[in-house]
Image (tube, rainbow, N blue to C red):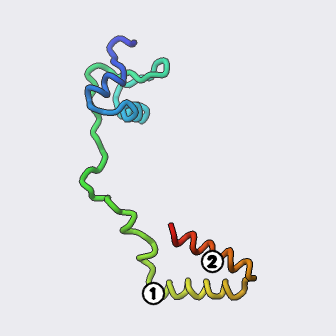
């Protein structure tokens, strides 16, 4: 062990963090003076805990649903997509149509 330093495991326990998160903070350079020695992270005694930048307000909950593409397509664009789909199915062989229908079913179930 290095003099003037404590292990990342001990510091994680003091700060109430997981060891994995502590290692990530060290790797990203967010803990000033942290050094890696023999494959282990060591934190200077008296180091300050970095600010937690994660959002916990719930502001971004379900943001993926908010920007879902299907709900944002206007009627004109949807009509164009349907026309392209109809033309594609007209000019395909029976085998191509079956593959296309299987693909459409597969993508709708996602």
- Describe residue 25's horizontal placement relative to residue 104 as left or right: left
Mark 1 or 2, which is nearer the eye? 2
Residue occupying the point 24% across, 54% down:
57
**Does residue 5 lie above or below 68 as drawn?**
above
**Does residue 60 lie above or below 86 as drawn?**
above
- Describe residue 70's horizontal placement relative to residue 6 as left or right: right
The residue lying toward the viewer, choosing from 108 and 48, is: 108
Residue occupying the point 26% across, 50% down:
56
Q: Are marks 1 and 2 in contact (CB under 8 Å)?
A: no
Q: Residues within 10 Å of mark 2 (few under 14, many from 20)?
A: few
Q: Residues within 10 Å of mark 1 (few under 14, many from 20)?
A: few
Q: Give percent across and percent down for residue 107.
A: 55, 70
Q: Give percent across and percent down for residue 82.
A: 56, 86
| Residue, disc 1 | 75
CA–CA distance in space, label 1 to label 2:
23 Å
Image quadrant where residue 44 sits:
top left
Image quarter of the N terminus? top left
**Does residue 73 lie above or below 53 as drawn?**
below
Q: Give percent across and percent down for residue 85.
A: 61, 83
**Earlier sequence position, callout 1 versus callout 2:** 1
Secondary structure at numbered mark 2: helix
Which circle marks residue 101 in the picture? Answer: 2
Residue occupying the point 50% across, 84% down:
77
Secondary structure at numbered mark 1: helix
């Amino acid at each position: 062990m290095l003099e003037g330093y404590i292990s990342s495991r001990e510091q994680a326990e003091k700060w109430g963090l997981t060891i994995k998160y502590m290692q990530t903070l060290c790797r990203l350079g967010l803990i000033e003076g942290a050094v890696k020695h023999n494959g282990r992270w060591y934190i200077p005694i008296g180091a300050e805990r970095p600010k937690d930048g994660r959002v916990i307000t719930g502001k971004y909950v379900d943001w993926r649903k908010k920007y879902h593409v299907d709900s944002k397509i206007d009627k004109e664009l949807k009509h164009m997509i349907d026309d392209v789909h109809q033309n594609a199915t007209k000019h395909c062989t029976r085998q191509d149509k079956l593959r296309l229908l299987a693909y459409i079913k597969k993508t709708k179930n996602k």
